[in-house]
Amino acid sequence: MPEHRTSPLMYAVIFGALLLLTLLTVLASYFQLGVWTVPVALGIAAAKATLVALFFMHLLHSSRLSWLVVAAGLFWLGIMLALTFSDYLSRSWQPY
Amino acid sequence: LSANSGVLAHHFDDLEQQHEAATLGMWVFLATEILFFGAVLTCYFVYRYGYLGGVNYDRAFSAAGHNLNRLVGGLNTAVLLGSSFTMAMAVWAAQTGRRRELRLFLVLTLVLGAVFLAIKGGEWYEHGVEHLVPGAGFDHEEFAKQNVNGRQAELFFVFYFILTGLHALHMTIGVGVLVFLLAMAWRGRYGPTYYTPVEVAGLYWHFVDIVWIFLFPILYLINH
């Protein structure tokens, strides 16, 4: 089949980057980051997930149809999160 | 029967079209999996940050999650990332017709997947010893001493066991798929012209890796 092939060197580089990001996120958890704790942890996780999807899962060289399916999955996840939390995070008028 | 019998199904024009259809099918399944795990995580964050009649469980969840060992979790993350690397290499070996390397990388992926499950199982066992498993044996008192609601801490562990349990179930299915691939690879079924099953199983394996990439910080790291 004619499609693009990723080289072993590239896979090794991505693997190294993933291990570094893992080390970084574990180290970050030892610091008091306050309100930034969750954004930092999830930001690093999103970066790692992007690397896995683009290179290990070959999304970078996949058809536009594959991109559309991924985008649809994330979009629907966004709908679930946005509609749920626009409710649950905006109830501060309720008495404690 | 078509000339390409055994590899090309009759309803496809050629192998390339068949390969495209199979990968797309796996991506569609994975899109539904995003929502499958996403729904449980949404629920977790609702309890954690949502206003539930004037309270949320943020403090209790943090106190409960504090019992997880982030170094063990980090080690397991590295093991799983390693298995994704060897899986990617298995696809490469199949693409380039390296049959011996294909078998080697499939075995390595299998072993690393099994190591992950073994470490995870060891953690679960420890939670049992420490009375952190939801149910009659859960140690509410320990949390009461820290001025934390034990019932809320227990709920954290409900989420923890559902999320890590579902993830481990996916891993176990993946291990089964790898055993199948290995048996087929041993018979020399995969090569540069036909390696679709290896590629599609790889997509699944990497996705399960991505799920863990999110579970690790959400369950282990943000609670310290």
Image (tube, grey):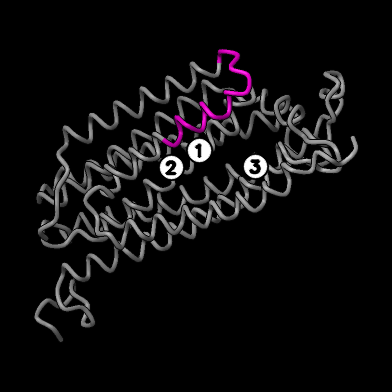
Dominant secondary structure of the residues highlighted in magenta in the image: helix
Q: Amino acid at mark 2?
A: Ile
What is the crowding at mark 1: few (fewer than 14 residues within 10 Å), some, or many (at least 20)? some
- Residue at the extreme top of the image, as rendered: A31
Considering only vertical position in the picture, is B201 above or below B56? below
Q: Which residue is mark 1?
A: B214
Q: Amino acid at mark 3?
A: Phe
- Give me the residue at 37% from left, 48% from top: B205
First along the sequence among labels 3 and 2: 3
Q: From mark 3 to mark 2, how far is it between C-alphas?
A: 18 Å
Residue A1, picture quadrant: bottom left
CB under 8 Å between discs 1 and 3: no
Q: Which residue is mark 2?
A: B210
- Give me the residue at 16% from left, 32% from top: A9
- Residue at the extreme right of the image, as rendered: A95
Q: Which residue is mark 3?
A: B161
What residue range appears in magenta?
A: A30-46
Q: Is residue B121 left or right of residue A48?
A: right
Q: Amino acid at mark 1?
A: Phe
What is the crowding at mark 3: few (fewer than 14 residues within 10 Å), some, or many (at least 20)? some
Residue B136, picture quadrant: top right
Position of residue B98 measured from the top left corner of the image (x, y, whole percent): 11, 47
- Give me the residue at 68% from left, 48% from top: A86
Q: From mark 1 to mark 2, how far is it between C-alphas?
A: 7 Å
